[in-house]
Image (cartoon, rainbow, N blue to C red):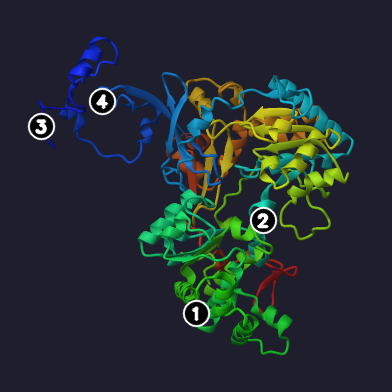
Amino acid sequence: MTFYTGFYMRMQPEATWIEKLAQGLGLIPDLTESVTEESEMLSPGPLNSYLPPEKWDDWEEYEATGWSRKKKKRYSIIPTSCFNCESGCGMLSYVDKETGKVRKFEGNPFHPGSRGRNCAKGPATINQIEDPERILYPLKRLGKRGEGKWERVSWESVLQDISGKIRLALEEGRNNEIAYHVGRPGHEGYMDRVLHAWDVDGHNSHTNICSAGARFGYAIWDGIDRTSPDFANADFILLISVHLESGHYFNPHAQRIIEGKNNGTKIAVMDIRLSNTASRADYWMATYPGTEAAVLLAMARIILKEKLYNEEFLRNWVNWQEWLEEEHPDSDLSLEVAVEKLIEHYSEFTPEFAENESGVSVQTIIEVARRIGRAGSRFANMNWRSASSGNLGGWQVARCLQFLSVLTGSIGTPGGTLPNTWNKFHPSLCSKPPAQKFWNELHFPNEYPLSHYELSYLLPHFLKENRGKMSVYFTRVFNPVWTYPDGFSWIEALRDEDKVGLHIALTPTWNETAYFADYVLPMGHSSERHDLISYETHVGMWVAYRQPVLREYARRQGQEPEFSYQVNPGEVWEEDEFWIELSWRIDPEGKLGVRDHFLSPYREGEKLTVGEYYRYIFERVPGLPERAAEENLTPLDFMRRYGAFEIKNEVYEIYRNPLTDEQLEGTEIDERSGTVLKQGIPV
């Protein structure tokens, strides 16, 4: 293609006489525009949606504030993953080659979940990194807890002090006095391995005031407590308190929900508030809080009565025989009878009853139910937090929603709703310590045997009742003083050194709980830490690598920092390396068995490094070594280079896969249901 030459394009208007006068007096910068030849602007070449990876090591672009003067910046592009919600979307970090600092973040097109797109929180990571009030160095308390007096200390002194107290507790058999209380994990299996290596039942979380209600409702169906909807391929989508703009996995989910909508998918939203998502829906069902289950059961009854259910799925994959024998032992053992009895069982849940309970009209309930029935195996749905966590018996919302998926046979199907474990990668670890053999009643009290997650909000009350104590208590990216409704109970417990012996706050920023800690230890943001990530964002399976980008930048420059805090801002560290170093010091002579789980798999008798930990995992990711070899890279270097890898493009209907000879060995078939059993348990 030939372009005209000899012309130039003016990118800004001619300076006015006032501007020219101000320029002459030196009051404003020179506004004279250098000539830009049209041939420069129109030189032939393909358009790119994203930066070509072959140019990531030395990317050049015009400065955003000086492009008209053709001011250029040179960057090294290094991938990482966002840490501002659980989605773990891919990001590209722009490291300014002139200053050696991260300048900005954009989407990583090689990330299968986010596909190069980020919400506002991804690029906003730069604000967190540059936050003038962030914690940059390890701090130790001076004076009383909550007094606000601190001194800067070294990481080595921190490790020695904490490891000594943990070692003493383990040697004296006080294992249950060590606890790790986490808000946002952000990694796959790392901390469980550490706690098991210490032989403590010390994991606590915020989940019981978050998603435990919905998780329990799902778990009692099939033992899997989260779902993975195939929104992009659905014919009908039902969302309960799940929002494109603020919900669970909302960037990857929002992309696929809108893709489905653009392809004709109809959407219903069940929520009392007109959220942004509800405003884009075809049906807004403004249920009164706590009435969602009544509407769902009314829709289930309609599907049953109008024979919109998936007969093949119910007949072959649902244990209706057991239900009939338990509830109606004198009835004929047939699916037809089971359906009749179910209609009778839910006779009170008429559309009129549901309207009276929820405020949603009879017409809407019937129409949405029929839409769901007609969608069949392409019915996708999701419920999380809100409706299931904010109401007494809220777990029934998820349970009733899953009932619709079962009736329509949309479990694990294209356009349906999958168990989340089908889409999550679980790594092979270089050492997998056995789980502890005892129970910590401060986390799972005996009087609440059906608790689906730790009853963490009761911890300060149990401490106050002298049911136990915390000798070493870690809070990580977690702020119970603010999160829980009884924050002052937490303040009271955290102030009492007889109840909480040593409190360590692992956090990138100050918060109300860290104020009452003995140590405040700065942990990195998205671009300052290592983590392994794999979430159920869609029907595929992927693994992503969050990495400290300045450490990788230093490596590309020929340097090999020993620890991430040596290249991060100030002395900001990361949990992965911190736990390795702490565990090594807990068991300096190897007598406790802790050190055995932190040995290098490549250097006999030597301490594990964070690089070796991830090298071992990536060498065992299905398909990754072969893909890396295509570019003459090791699996670890491939992940450093691209930040993510797609293991499977899609995963559907695993339950229809034939059982292997190994799986069939020692099994028997239940004559009544046709279920394959091993030691009485379905295979």
The residue at 40%/26% (across/down) is 75
Q: Nearer the viewer, mark 1 or mark 4?
A: 4
| Residue 632 location (% of width, % of height) | 44, 35
| Residue 358 location (% of width, % of height) | 57, 70
Q: Nearer the viewer, mark 2 or mark 1?
A: 2
Report how far apart the C-alphas of labels 4 and 2 lie in the structure: 54 Å
Report how far apart the C-alphas of labels 2 and 1 lie in the structure: 31 Å
**274 relative to 396, above or below:** above
Report how far apart the C-alphas of labels 1 and 3 lie in the structure: 65 Å
Residue 272 placement, left or right of 155: left
Q: Amino acid at mark 4?
A: Ser
Q: Amino acid at mark 3?
A: Tyr
- What numbered label is drawn on residue 212? 2
- What numbered label is drawn on residue 68? 4
Mark 2, other Cα within 10 Å: few <14 / some 14–19 / many ≥20 = many
In the rendered structure, which disc, 3 or 4, sits on the residue that comes first in sequence?
3
- What numbered label is drawn on residue 4? 3
Q: Nearer the viewer, mark 3 or mark 4?
A: 4
| Label pair 2/1, CB-CB below 8 angstroms | no
